[in-house]
């Protein structure tokens, strides 16, 4: 009889524990496999957070406090829930007492996110892009200025190269046309002058586009006006037709004039520093009392 009574009491105790375990997980616990549930399990059961989890659960009355528990609830190998279901491992507690575990874990995670360091981290994250932008702004400005300066320099250099090519091409065309005309003039005083005039106008137009320092621009303008052979060489001298010797002398003088002026045109391609120095010197000469014009 005693054995049956003991067996009966033991069976009733097991049934009572089983009933408590079956009814322990409330409907409000996060669904198994849900993102919220996974985050809670990973975070709160992690070794560095277990002690904080048990402390939070004890303060919420979900675990026995250290003073009444046979083994301190701060231990990480077992816990004693207040629901009188006996000692169990933290993993078993998270399964059998899901609502208690979820409540304690949520409180712990909320407290951690609302800690003194959180606002600073959020502020740093929010202001990070602005701080990065403001820090890099001077570098961006310098880079933009260098890019614009490089583009401007390249544009000016390209224009100078093009103008130099035009001057060289115009000088070569004018020299060739002048020589051809002067050879024909020595044989025929009425030789056609059209090609020389066309080449002279083209070279004059290129000279008119010369910019830069004032001395260079002024020199180019004078050369455009002084280019020889603006008109055909004379056929008569007074009432007398020029002979071959006289035409040869005039043709030779014209060749020398052409060579001098084209050499001066070539000098326009000197570096800008030279022409800035010439500009400053001419300006100083004009402002000096008694200086010649």
Image (cartoon, rainbow, N blue to C red):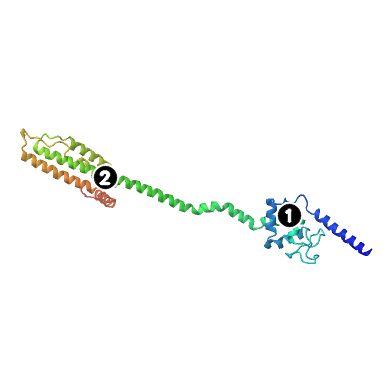
Q: Quadrant of residue 240?
A: top left
Residue extending farthest to the top is 239
- Percent x, y of residue 260: 17, 46
- Regarding residue 122, the answer to whether it shows in the image is yes
Kindly identify the residue that appears in the image at 31 percent across and 45 percent down. Answer: 159
> Residue 292 vs residue 127: left or right?
left
- Percent x, y of residue 218: 25, 44
Kindly identify the residue that appears in the image at 25 percent across and 39 percent down. Answer: 205
Which comes before the other along the chain, label 1 or label 2? 1
Q: Check the image and report above or below for 168 versus 109.
A: above
> Residue 137 vs residue 254: left or right?
right
- Percent x, y of residue 27: 77, 49
Say which element carries label 2. Answer: helix
Return the residue at label 1.
102
Mark 1 vs mark 2, foreground winner is 1
Q: Residues within 10 Å of mark 1 (few under 14, many from 20)?
A: many
Cα gap from disc 1 to disc 2, whole angstroms: 84 Å
| Nearer to us in this view, 155 or 270 | 155
Kindly identify the residue that appears in the image at 16 percent across and 45 percent down. Answer: 259
- Total marks shown come to 2
Return the residue at label 2.
165
Residue extending farthest to the right is 1
| Nearer to us in this view, 37 or 3 | 3
- Percent x, y of residue 76: 72, 64
């Amino acid at each position: 009889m005693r054995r049956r009574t003991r067996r009966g009491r033991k069976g009733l105790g097991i049934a009572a524990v089983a009933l408590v375990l079956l009814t322990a997980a409330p409907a409000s616990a996060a669904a198994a496999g849900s993102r919220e549930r996974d985050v809670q399990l990973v975070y709160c059961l992690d070794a560095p957070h277990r002690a904080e989890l048990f402390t939070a659960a004890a303060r919420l009355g979900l675990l026995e406090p250290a003073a009444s528990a046979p083994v301190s609830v701060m231990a990480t190998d077992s816990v004693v829930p207040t629901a009188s279901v006996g000692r169990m491992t933290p993993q078993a507690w998270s399964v059998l007492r899901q609502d208690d575990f979820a409540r304690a874990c949520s409180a712990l995670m909320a407290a951690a996110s609302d800690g003194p360091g959180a606002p600073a981290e959020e502020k740093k994250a929010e202001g990070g892009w602005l701080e990065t932008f403001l820090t890099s702004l001077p570098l961006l400005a310098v880079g933009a200025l260098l890019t614009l300066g490089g583009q401007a320099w390249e544009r000016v250099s390209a224009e100078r190269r093009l103008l130099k090519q035009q001057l060289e091409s115009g000088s070569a065309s004018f020299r060739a046309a002048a020589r051809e005309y002067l050879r024909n003039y020595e044989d025929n005083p009425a030789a056609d002058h059209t090609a020389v005039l066309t080449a002279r106008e083209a070279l004059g137009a290129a000279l008119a586009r010369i910019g830069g320092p004032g001395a260079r621009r002024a020199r180019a303008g004078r050369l455009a006006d002084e280019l020889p052979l603006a008109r055909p060489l004379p056929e008569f001298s007074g009432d007398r037709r020029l002979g071959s010797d006289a035409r040869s002398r005039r043709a030779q003088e014209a060749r020398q004039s052409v060579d001098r002026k084209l050499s001066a045109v070539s000098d326009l391609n000197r570096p800008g520093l030279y022409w800035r120095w010439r500009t400053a010197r001419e300006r100083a000469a004009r402002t000096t009392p008694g200086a010649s014009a």
